[in-house]
């Protein structure tokens, strides 16, 4: 553990999920492969009246339609699930598939993606860590992604789970580094922002976002995939299990 700024006493801990509590890269590699297989199997039936000869609907193929979706509605950047659905929908429309079939096809594709995106097992050591921490502090999950915390059996440790694109008090949760989810967590817990320790891997989303929201921050550097630091956290953790030190 490296200490950059003194930690003040905190009353709760919030966690990013992907690449903080587990490595997300192998999960996404598998999910990407599953989506390639899915489209290879499902697209021919949708394209039976089309002259399109595209045979591999990979990330590169969909990238153009993701940009189009964001051009039409920039707010989709805060909701990765809806953005994915609109990306598939616009791509299918461009392939000559009817609007009704495209909407239905996009929905089914997103459902398939979501299944595989959350089809993994969180390591036992993380379950033990969260269980131990939850005995001392309320825990919150704050994620820009859409992993299903119930499916991966982490819901039991969190008093609240916030996803970008979700709703809090009737308002859209904007993604980190926007303060929305940090503010919602503090309001839910009835604590001041400086009484929340946020733990995450991304220098922008988690550390800059947490600092701007007035929270204390812990940067998890073990997976080395998040954006680099532009502002120092309170502490750096080479492994999230270093949080055990606060239990003694």
Image: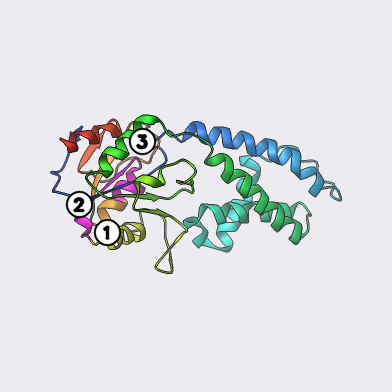
Tell me the SS state at disc 3: helix
Spot occupied by residue 157 in the image (x, y as percentages of width and height): 35, 45
Given this view, does label 2 or label 3 mark the residue nearer the observer? Answer: 3
Q: How many marks?
A: 3
Tell me the SS state at disc 1: helix
Tell me the SS state at disc 2: loop
Q: Is residue 205 magenta?
A: yes
In contact (CB < 8 Å): disc 3 and disc 1? no
The mark nearer the N terminus, 3 or 1, is: 3
Which label was assigned to residue 11? 2
Mark 2 and mark 3: Cα distance apart in space: 21 Å
Residue bearing the label numbered 1? 189
Spot occupied by residue 65 in the image (x, y as percentages of width and height): 63, 52
Q: Which residues are magenta?
A: 191-208
Q: Is residue 180 magenta?
A: no
In contact (CB < 8 Å): disc 2 and disc 1? yes
Residue bearing the label numbered 3? 127
Q: Residues within 10 Å of mark 2 (few under 14, many from 20)?
A: some
Mark 2 and mark 1: Cα distance apart in space: 9 Å
Query: Which one is in front, 244 or 27?
Result: 244
Mark 3 and mark 1: Cα distance apart in space: 22 Å
Which label was assigned to residue 46? none
Query: Which one is in front, 10 or 67?
Result: 10
């Amino acid at each position: 553990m490296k200490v950059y700024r003194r930690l003040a006493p905190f009353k709760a801990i919030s966690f990013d999920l992907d690449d903080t509590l587990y490595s997300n890269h192998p999960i996404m590699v598998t999910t990407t492969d599953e989506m390639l297989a899915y489209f290879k199997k499902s697209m021919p039936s949708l394209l039976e009246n089309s002259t399109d000869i595209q045979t591999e609907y990979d990330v590169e193929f969909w990238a153009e339609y993701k940009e189009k979706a964001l051009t039409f509605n920039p707010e989709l950047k805060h909701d990765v699930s809806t953005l994915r659905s609109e990306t598939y929908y616009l791509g299918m429309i461009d392939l000559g598939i009817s609007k009704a079939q495209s909407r239905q096809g996009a929905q089914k594709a997103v459902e398939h993606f979501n299944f595989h995106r959350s089809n993994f097992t969180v390591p036992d050591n993380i379950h033990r860590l969260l269980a131990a921490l939850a005995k001392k502090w309320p825990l919150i999950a704050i994620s820009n992604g859409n992993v299903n915390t119930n499916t991966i059996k982490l819901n039991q440790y969190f008093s609240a789970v916030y996803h970008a694109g979700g709703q809090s008090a009737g308002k859209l949760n904007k993604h980190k580094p926007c303060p929305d989810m940090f503010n919602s967590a503090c309001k839910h817990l009835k604590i001041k922002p400086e009484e929340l320790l946020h733990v995450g891997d991304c220098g922008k989303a988690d550390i800059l976002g947490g600092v701007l929201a007035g929270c204390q921050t812990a940067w998890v550097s073990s997976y080395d995939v998040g954006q680099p630091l532009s502002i120092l956290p309170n502490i750096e953790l080479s492994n999230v299990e270093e949080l055990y030190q606060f239990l003694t």
